[in-house]
Amino acid sequence: MHKSTFNCTKCGECCIYTTVKLSEEDMQRIEKLGHKEFHEWDHIIRAPVLKKNKDGCVFLRKKGDKFLCSIYGNRPEVCRKYPFFDTDVVEDCRPVSMEKMLKGK
């Protein structure tokens, strides 16, 4: 998949399985929307991250068979870049597949 032609299928896997590290700017942008309890401290990466509930990211919503972000226009920078962090081409955007790709498997 190339960045310029990528078309998200809205499967929700990135929002279900990915830990999203938040910058101060991300947190301020989301707080301006009126959200207060959307992040927690991750002791492994030593940074604030988006909270998850049993269904994934607290902002993930299901509409029919599609998953949508309820703060899409104000989503964190990590979400804006996903899955194209350091490249313009990825084999697969699903988190499990990306993990294998990054490990060279």
Image (cartoon, grey):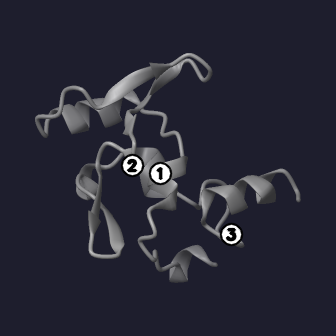
Residue 66, x across and y down, in percent:
34, 73
Disc 1 target residue: 16
Name the residue located 52 percent from the left edge and 57 percent from the top edge.
Answer: 82
Disc 2 target residue: 55
Name the residue located 24 percent from the left edge and 26 percent from the top edge.
Answer: 37
Q: Split into 4 quadrants, where in the image is the C terminus?
A: bottom right
Figure check: 73 above or below 56: below
Q: Split into 4 quadrants, where in the image is the N terminus?
A: bottom right
Q: Do the numbered discs 2 and 1 sit on residues whose CB atoms are within 8 Å?
A: yes
Residue 88, x across and y down, in percent:
64, 68
Work out how far the residue at label 2 is from the one at label 1, CA to CA, in angstroms.
7 Å
Work out how far the residue at label 2 is from the one at label 3, CA to CA, in angstroms.
26 Å
Disc 3 target residue: 90
* Residue density around tag 1, few if under 14, some if 14–19, many if 20 or more, within 10 Å: some
Q: Amino acid at mark 1?
A: Ile
Labels 2 and 3: the sequence-earlier one = 2
Who is closer to the viewer here, 98 or 56?
56
Extreme bottom residue here? 5
- Horizontally, is 85 left or right of 12 in the view? right
Q: Amino acid at mark 3?
A: Val
Extreme left residue here? 34
- Helix, strand or loop at mark 1: helix
Q: Which image quadrant is residue 27 in?
A: top left
Q: Do the numbered discs 3 and 1 sit on residues whose CB atoms are within 8 Å?
A: no
Count the numbered circles shown: 3
